[in-house]
Image: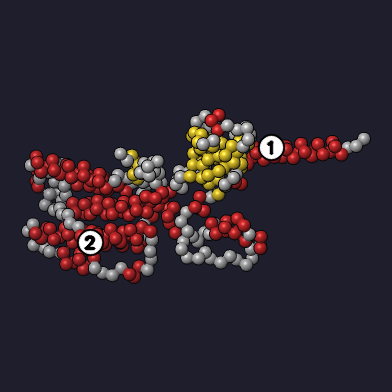
Amino acid sequence: MNKRPFQNHFRTGDRWRRQDNALNINNVEIGSFIHACEGEMLYASTHTKIPYFNAPVYLENKCLIGKIDEILGPINQVYFTVKPQEGIVATSFRTGDKVYIGSDKLLPLERFLPQPKSSIRKKSQKLSRASYQGRNHKTHQGFNRKNKPSHEFSNYIYDNRHFSLIRALNLADFITELNGFCGIMSIFSSMKYCLGDPLDTTWLWKSITLMPLGWKKKSSLMGKELDSLADLVTFAFALGIRTLIDTIILSFFVLCGISRLARFNISVDSLPKDKHGKLKYFEGTPIPSSLSIVAIMAWCVRSGCILEKLPLGVIYENSFFEFHPIVIIFALSGCAMCSKTLKIPKI
C-alpha cells in the first residue's frame, strides 16, 4: 500500500491546523466598521498601534475578508480602508462590526511621530548584516530610544494624567514663566504707584525681566512657545489689582493663559478635526472663556459693587494676607484653561 498520499494529506491537515491555532493566538481586534465607500470598507481603528499596508484582515470567525488599502486621519484617531477580496461585498457589513489582524502586522505609534532633524545615530557594528536590509533597517531607526523630540512631543499630546502640563515643564520652562511673572509684577507696581502707593518697585521687576537667560543652555518645545508669549506680557501687556495676594492670584491666571496657548500651539495639529478641518473640541477652556469674568466685572461696576463693596467682601483686612475672595474666580479659570482632561466642544 502506498502510504505517501495519506502522509501528504496528514501533513496538509496538520499545516492548516497550525495556521488555525495561529489565528486563535495571534489575531487581535484592529477596527470597527463605519460604512462602505466606493466598493471598500471604512473602519475606525480600535488599537493603539498602526496596521501594515496590504496586511490581511479577518472576521471574528477567522474568515479572510480583504487587505488594508489606505490609512487615514490624525495619529490620535486613525481610520483605514479594507479592499475586499473576491466574493466579499462591502455593503454586507453593519456599523460596529469588528475586524481582526495578526499581531505581527502592527507598527508602534512612535514610528509616526516627528523625527529629529539631526542624523540618526550610527548603527552598532555588532548588528548582523541582515538587520540593515529592507524594513528592518527602518525599524531600528523608529525604535531609537534617544529620540528625545518624539518623546517630548508625545508627553504633551498623549499624557492624560492630571496636571500633565505642569509635569511636562522643566526647570528652563519655569524660568521662562518667571520672566512673564516679572513682567506682570512690573505692570502691577506701575499701576499701584499711579493709584498713590508711595513704594515704586517697577524698576526692580523690570531689571529682573531684562536679565539674560542664555545660561540655561537648554531648549524644549514648550520653551520655544513660552519665550515669545512671556515676552508679549513683559513688553506689551498691562493689568492691575490692589492687594499682594490678589496680585499673585491674577499673575497665576495670566501664566496659565500663557501656558495654555503654548500647549495649544504644539498640539493643534494632533487634535481631532471634523471633515471641514475644524477642531472638534478644546483641551481645557479656551482663552476667550475669560470674557465671562469680564462680564462679571462689568456687572459689578454697573451695580456699584466695587472697591470695599465687592461681592464676598475682604478677608484679613489691613493685614499682610488681605485679599478679595472674588479673585478665586481667576484661579479656577486658570486651572480650567490648563486642564487636559476637560474637553470643551467647539461650536
Residue 140 relative to residue 255: left or right: right
Above or below, comparing residue 290 to residue 152 in the picture: above
Q: Which residue lies furthest to the front in this view?
A: 38
The residue labelled by disc 1 is 20
Q: Which residue is drawn at 64% across and 63% down?
A: 127
Task: Identify the residue at image location x=38%, y=66%.
Answer: 218
Q: Residue at x 76, y 36 (%)?
A: 13
Residue on which disc 2 sits: 234
Q: Where residue 212 sits in the image (x, y, percent)?
A: 28, 70
Rendered image: mark on residue 196: none
Q: Is residue 225 left or right of residue 22?
A: left
**Residue at the right extreme of this rendering:** 1
- The part of the image, by quadrant, that contains residue 230 is bottom left
Q: Is residue 326 visible?
A: no
Q: In which quarter of the image is the N terminus?
A: top right
Image spot of residue 36 (x, y percent): 51, 34
